[in-house]
Structures are given as structure tokens and as C-alpha cells.
Image (cartoon, rainbow, N blue to C red):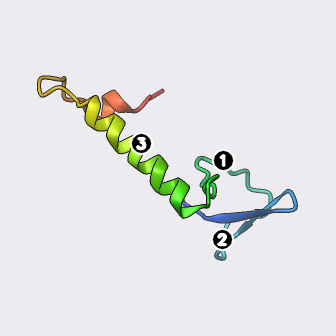
Amino acid sequence: MRQAITATYRDGVFYPDEPCDLPEGTTVRVAELSRPPLVSDPEERRRILKALVDRMAKNPISADAPKLTREDLHERG
């Protein structure tokens, strides 16, 4: 059974943000981590975003590019 649990990492331990009903000693797999941004200055973030948008505009995806399915985008195995 899959269950998504959010937790906070503190002092080498993951603390669930909400109560969860897992049996003691249950092994869990951490699948996704969110990290705070490395750049906190609003002006620098704005500059980085503008550079990203400009670069995307210079390299558009071709209209005849192949349409990828979910299976194409995700490794399965």
C-alpha cells in the first residue's frame, strides 16, 4: 500500500508532519525531497527566471516534435 507522508528532517531524524498509523519498525522509502531555494534575494530570482524564460523562447519545441506519453516520460521496472 502506498501512502504519502510529509515529514521534516531535524537532527538526523525524519519527523512526520501529521500522525501516521504505521506499525513500529516499518521501513519506508523517501521518494521525493523539496528543498528551500538556494537563492533568496528576490531580484536575483527575478533575473534567473527572466534568463530561463529568454532561453526557452530562443529554443522552442518544434511543432512536429513527437508527442510523448506518460510511459515515455517515466522509467518503469
Say which label, 1 or 3, has the lower sequence index: 1
Task: Report crowding for label 1: few under 14, some 14 to 19, many 20 or more residues within 10 A (C-alpha).
Answer: few
Identity of the residue drawn at 32% across and 31% down: 71
Residue 16 versus residue 26: which sits nearer the camera?
Answer: 16
Q: Which mark is residue 21?
A: 2
Q: Amino acid at mark 2?
A: Asp
Q: Is residue 1 visible?
A: no
Q: Amino acid at mark 1?
A: Arg
Q: 14 left or right of 73?
A: right
Give the percent coordinates (x, y) of residue 26. 74, 56
Q: Quadrant of residue 58?
A: top left
* Residue 58 position (above or below residue 3): above
Number of dots carrying numbers: 3
The residue at the far bottom in this view is: 19
Give the percent coordinates (x, y) of residue 21. 65, 71
Identity of the residue drawn at 63% across and 55% down: 35
Q: 65 left or right of 51?
A: left
Q: Nearer the viewer, mark 2 or mark 3?
A: 3
Mark 1 secondary-structure assignment: loop
Q: Nearer the viewer, mark 1 or mark 3?
A: 3
